[in-house]
Image (spheres, rainbow, N blue to C red):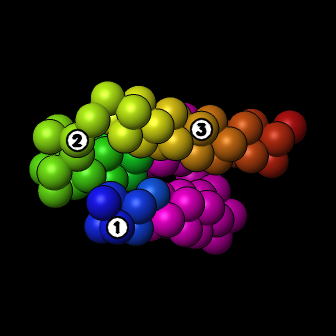
Amino acid sequence: MPCRSLLWFLQLLLQPIAGAIFAGWLGLPLLISSGLALLITGMVGFHTWESGMSEAGNGWRISTILMLAVTLGFTLLAFFALAN
């Protein structure tokens, strides 16, 4: 299970950094930045599932989906807060 936990940390690190690059430095519109954040979340989720999460127990699956959703939610909240 350690590899799957590392993927969560990848999401926690990658999402804010990508958000700062997309919305801050590049100045992309909110919709495009949000779409890119969703794409990153999907890519991390897909990689997590392919690396063995599909064979894990229900608790691991639910907590992984919840973690990805919460991280995406915080990123989108930050985008909307910066936009206003």
Residue underneath mark 3: 70
Q: Whole-percent x and y of residue 58?
A: 32, 29
Tell me: residue 20, above or below residue 70: below
Q: Given this view, does label 1 or label 3 mark the residue nearer the observer?
A: 1
Q: Earlier in the sequence, mark 2 or mark 1?
A: 1
Q: Split into 4 quadrants, where in the image is the C terminus?
A: top right
Near mark 1 (Cα within 10 A), the count class, few <14, some 14-19 or many ≥20, is: few
Numbered badge on residue 2: 1
User: Label 1 is placed on what type of residue?
Assistant: Pro
Q: Whole-percent x and y of residue 74?
A: 68, 42
Q: Secondary structure at mark 1?
A: helix
Task: Report if residue 36 lies within the magenta region.
Answer: yes
User: Label 3 is placed on what type of residue?
Assistant: Val
Residue range highlighted in magenta: 9-37
- Of residue 71 and residue 83, the one placed in the foreground of this image is 71
Residue underneath mark 2: 56
Left or right: 55 with respect to 23? Answer: left
